[in-house]
């Protein structure tokens, strides 16, 4: 595959990233109430120097752009705070105050961003909040701009389905997702020329307090218009694109178009490395095409929830057209090759973008990549199995590794061959061979160090920021072991936003099936809160090691062994280990049944090994 890079002489992105600068947060550090640093943009000061050999030149350029920090004017009455989290906070001035779009990840960074805005634009109150979509970096800091007790009368707008997706995405597979996210974002890596230099979508993720205030206004259709504090907004729903619930929207009086996270200055993920449901790149491209036509002629600037704006109507159309073609091309060409019998891995090696897209900086794979995105499209349509019988019933990693090393001639020979491949520059196979050796002989420090060295070289050569972080984090863990650094995806307000069925599902996926095989129990939960205040009855059945549940719309045909009448808050207390008596819950039957049910729960290890068995 031929390598085509855009021109480094093109400074348009730098000009746009600096345009409208008002002022920066000095120092660019945000701390929690207890003094813990939750954001440090100043740690990236080394990016002002010349690029070293430990970073891909294209990624170094992207990192320089993503670490621009401060308050910027987008257009008259619209401002953005960038560089105080992975995402941007946008502020639209209304008649009485300001409408806040996407208040970052953490309460602390959002408060700092809002204070910076107020320092330069006055002490305006928040008169509205808009969540562009259901990912945590676009709502988690809301209490930093809307503290407890101030939300009364403030409309909070979000796309239909926002709340369900916002609180469920990180619950069911949350432990595994958090562990993998620590690799993807380079948690624990030093901010340095040979360490973490960003994540492509931004500099890093903040580590402060996560919050959530539920929406009060649902956007349910394209063309829906709302006025918030005198600000007119026209919406386009884009479900199933970058997020399950997402929307673009136009400020017609400002001639400004918000593109959420559907079009940013890099190739995005069809399947993020931390893990998620595979996104639909076909639909993604179609909604971008719809946006081009639907909003045509009504804006002079396009801005998003990450990166910097694009000014000029024609420039925005060109940007959106190339972003549309990017996702449509990788989708369609993956399907073409898939139908010719290629596997996901083979497609990733064969596919290449058209020259015009390879020359576009915003189509480069800094966050997503052409390689793992095409594999994601393959997965969406055909799943994990590539059709080869040899791959249908493969051995688990440790068993396969032992046999692989035996075939290679034993541990010493495998180590020597792995080093030889590395020295010859065949880093991909060196990583494969040495990875098998580490799984076959995890006590070998020589094998770990050899593999760490290969990962380090792969990371330093990667244009993709998340690939770089994954490789460097793997090298660090091989050398230092599993650290306590984790991405915390939990918070009380998000737990409170879970529906009762979602809470029960979160218990069901923790049940140790083999231990519960021989138990049978039936519990009814009568939750006294619900639509119309009438509450609902949920029947829980443990049978064959499976916890199932259903909402009972009529009196059950058979009695339950235990019926609990309680609020959702009391249910949360029970799940936390408190007793029915302590919580004042009305119980009919044997209260020990619920204790017995919870006794089958398991607690997953948040620091499970990744690069070792």
Image (spheres, helix red, strand yellow):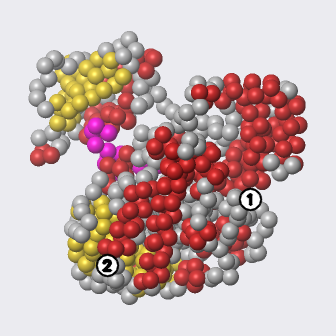
Query: Mark 1 or mark 2: which comes first in sequence?
Result: 2
Quarter where residue 431 is shown: top right
Q: Secondary structure at mark 2?
A: strand
How far from the left and from the top, in percent, is residue 303?
44, 75
Q: Is residue 501 magenta?
A: yes
Residue 270 in the figure: left or right of residue 194: left
Q: Which residue is at a point 34% across and 34% down the rendered structure image?
A: 505
How far from the left and from the top, in percent, is residue 377?
50, 49
Please name whichever residue, 389 or 270, is drawn nearer the observer in this view of the structure: 389
Instruction: Confirm whether residue 174 shows in the render.
Output: no
Please name whichever residue, 93 or 208, is drawn nearer the observer in this view of the structure: 93
Disc 1 target residue: 461
Work out whether 544 lies above or below 57: above
Please name whichever residue, 571 or 335, is drawn nearer the observer in this view of the structure: 335
How far from the left and from the top, in percent, is residue 456?
76, 52
Q: Which residue is at a point 56% across and 36% down the rendered structure image?
A: 386
Q: Please state the extent of the stretch shown in magenta in the rendering.
A: 486-502
Q: Secondary structure at mark 1?
A: helix
Task: Classify 10 Å Cα crowding around label 1: few (below 14), some (14-19), many (20 and above).
Answer: some
The C terminus, quarter of image: top right
The N terminus, quarter of image: bottom right
Q: Which mark is residue 286?
A: none
Q: Which residue is at a point 16% across and 17% down the rendered structure image?
A: 558
Quarter where residue 283 is shown: bottom left
Residue 306 in the figure: left or right of residue 367: left
Q: CA distance from mark 1 to mark 2?
A: 42 Å
> Given the current orientation, which residue lies at the most extreme top position?
518
Disc 2 target residue: 251
> Given the current orientation, which residue lies at the most extreme front position?
340
Residue 65 in the figure: left or right of residue 297: right
Q: Which residue is at a point 61% across and 69% down the rendered structure image?
A: 355
Quarter where residue 569 is shown: top left
């Amino acid at each position: 595959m031929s390598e085509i890079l855009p021109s480094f002489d093109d400074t348009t992105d730098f000009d746009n990233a600096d345009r409208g600068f008002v002022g920066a947060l000095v120092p660019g550090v945000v701390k929690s109430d207890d003094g813990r640093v939750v954001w440090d943009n100043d740690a990236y000061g080394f990016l002002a120097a010349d690029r070293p050999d430990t970073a891909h030149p294209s990624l170094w350029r992207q990192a320089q752009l993503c670490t621009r920090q401060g308050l910027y004017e987008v257009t008259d009455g619209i401002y953005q705070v960038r560089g105080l989290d992975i995402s941007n906070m946008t502020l639209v001035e209304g008649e009485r105050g300001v409408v806040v779009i996407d208040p970052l990840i953490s309460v602390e960074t959002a408060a700092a961003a809002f204070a910076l805005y107020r320092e330069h634009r006055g002490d305006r109150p928040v008169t509205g909040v808009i969540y562009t979509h259901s990912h945590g970096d676009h709502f988690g800091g809301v209490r930093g701009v809307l503290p407890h007790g101030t939300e009364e009368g403030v409309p909070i707008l979000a796309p239909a389905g926002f709340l369900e997706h916002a609180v469920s995405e990180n619950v069911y597979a949350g432990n595994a997702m958090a562990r993998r996210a620590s690799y993807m974002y380079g948690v624990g890596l030093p901010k340095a020329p040979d360490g973490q230099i960003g994540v492509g979508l931004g500099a890093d993720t903040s580590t402060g307090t996560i919050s959530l205030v539920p929406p009060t206004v649902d956007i349910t259709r394209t063309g829906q218009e709302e006025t918030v504090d005198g600000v007119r907004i026209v919406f386009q729903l884009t479900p199933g694109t970058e997020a399950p619930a997402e929307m673009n929207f136009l400020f017609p009086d400002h001639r400004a178009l918000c593109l959420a996270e559907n079009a940013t200055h890099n190739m995005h993920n069809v399947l993020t490395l931390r893990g998620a449901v595979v996104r639909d790149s076909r639909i993604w491209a179609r909604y971008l095409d719809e946006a081009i036509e639907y909003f045509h002629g009504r804006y002079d600037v396009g801005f998003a929830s990450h990166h910097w704006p694009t000014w000029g109507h024609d420039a925005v159309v060109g940007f959106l057209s190339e972003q549309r073609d990017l996702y449509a091309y990788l989708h369609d060409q993956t399907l073409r090759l898939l139908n010719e019998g290629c596997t996901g891995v083979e497609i990733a090696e064969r596919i290449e973008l058209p020259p015009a897209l390879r020359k576009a900086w915003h189509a480069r794979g800094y966050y997503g990549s052409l390689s793992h995105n095409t594999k994601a499209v393959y997965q969406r349509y055909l799943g994990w199995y590539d059709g080869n019988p040899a791959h249908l019933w493969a051995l688990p990693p440790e068993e396969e590794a032992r046999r692989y090393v035996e075939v290679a001639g034993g541990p010493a020979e495998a180590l020597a061959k792995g080093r030889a491949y590395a020295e010859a520059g065949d880093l991909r196979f060196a990583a494969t061979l040495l990875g098998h050796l580490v799984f076959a002989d995890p006590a070998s420090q020589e094998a770990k160090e050899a593999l760490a060295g290969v990962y380090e070289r792969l990371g330093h050569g990667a244009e993709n920021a998340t690939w770089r972080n994954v490789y460097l984090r793997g090298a660090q863990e091989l050398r230092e072991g599993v650290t306590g650094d984790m991405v915390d995806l939990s918070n009380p307000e998000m737990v409170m936003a879970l529906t009762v069925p979602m809470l029960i599902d979160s218990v069901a996926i923790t049940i140790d099936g083999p231990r519960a095989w021989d138990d049978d129990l039936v519990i009814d939960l009568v939750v006294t809160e619900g639509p119309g205040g009438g509450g609902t009855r949920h029947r829980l059945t443990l049978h064959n090691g499976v916890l199932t549940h259903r909402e009972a719309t009529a009196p059950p045909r058979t009695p339950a062994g235990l019926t609990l009448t309680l609020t959702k808050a009391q249910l949360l207390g029970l799940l936390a280990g408190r007793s029915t008596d302590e919580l004042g819950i009305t119980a009919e039957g044997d209260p020990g049944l619920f204790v017995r049910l919870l006794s089958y729960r398991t607690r997953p290890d948040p620091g499970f090994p990744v690069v070792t068995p």
